[in-house]
Amino acid sequence: MARMPIAVIGAGLIGKTHVDRAFHHSEVALTGIAEPSPAGRQLAQSLGVPWFAGYEELLDKAKPRGAVIATPNATHADIAVKCLERGVAVVVEKPVADDVAQAKRICAAAEKSGQPALVGHQRRYNVIARRAKELIATGKLGRPVCATVLCTWLKPPGYFDTAWRREAGGGPVLINLIHDIDLLRFLFGEVVEVQAFASNAVRGFVVEDTAAIVLRMGNGALATITLSDTATAPWNWDLAAGEAERFPRREVDAFFLSGTEGSLTLPRLEFWNYRQGRGWEEPLSVERQVPKPACPYAEQLRHFRALVEGKEPPVCSAADATRSLEATLAVRAAAASGRPVQLG
């Protein structure tokens, strides 16, 4: 079976991951990298892959069937729309855009062109998240009651040498929290109300470094999220799930999901419930699920090809990702106003 030609636009931190997965994938062929930096050119040369300073030149010369867009958030919409208008399907790194209006531009362009626009919420492809969704769907948790989510870790000073990471929109709310909100939506359903506080007290940048969030879900469940990228702590999905090799994996949990019949932790997939009597004086039993590991980024590329060929429905369309963006932006709005924000 011939591999589907794809390109990667943007070769920064996450772009390099997409380049690596595409280069080694059995179902797609990496036909070009667009990245203006010298490091991007060196990366392309080291792989023997055509390099382009700009994405339009890449589209003209490499002629990919699909493109992964891993550029700064504010550029997502313009690049995605140009690709879709040229008949090139896209995987847009999260967030789908930096505001809802720009996200809707991508949705409209995808509908008009007839080309799929997938968004890179890669946790949905993780076997851990998929197993959790199965357990919840079968009713093992009963009615969802509450969720506690931790996203606490320390980004090194060099991370902020890139100017946009110190400005509004470049902080952990849109970079990290959006993943947690998307995974909560994937598992527990839609967010209908948001309350939040945010702080930049540690680093003093324009952008936040810490936030505390409360979400009301459409099914009545409540979720709390503690977020900080300035805390010396291991409690976050990225260190616990082992999705990226550059992060040292820790045997901890970051999600605690509770229902009337049981509770589930992620990513270790510990399921807690009562085997006999029910109530706080009765012993709880625990069992751990251990699914076979698989790379979510590689699975995303496999699904991307299947989506382009019309064989599978989208795991995370641009329209779906826009709802995660709306809920995440509501966190910023609630923190700024000091008032809860209602979502449709």
Image (cartoon, rainbow, N blue to C red):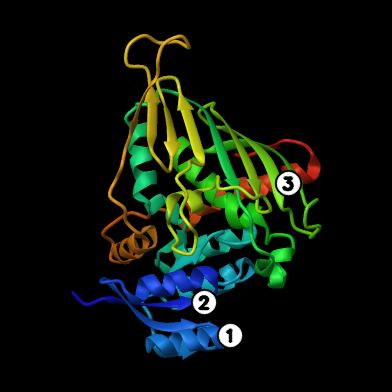
**First along the sequence among labels 3 and 2:** 2
Is residue 179 rendered to the left or right of residue 211?
A: left
Mark 2 lies on residue: 11
* Residue type, mark 1 in image: Ser
Q: In the image, residue 122 lies at what x, y percent?
A: 44, 56
Residue drawn at point x = 72 percent, y = 35 percent:
340
Furthest toward the left, the residue is 1
Crowdedness near tag 1: few (<14), some (14–19) or many (≥20) residues, C-alpha within 10 Å:
few
Q: Quadrant of the C terminus?
A: top right
Disc 3 from disc 2: Cα separation: 31 Å
Position of 165 relative to 58 (above/below): above
Foreground: 201 or 219?
Answer: 201
Residue drawn at point x = 68 percent, y = 62 percent:
170
**First along the sequence among labels 2 and 1:** 2
Q: Secondary structure at mark 1?
A: loop
Q: Which mark is residue 37?
A: 1
Q: In the image, residue 50 lies at what x, y percent?
A: 42, 89
Disc 3 from disc 1: Cα separation: 34 Å
**First along the sequence among labels 3 and 1:** 1
Q: Secondary structure at mark 2?
A: loop
Q: In the image, residue 65 lies at what x, y percent?
A: 36, 76
Mark 3 lies on residue: 333
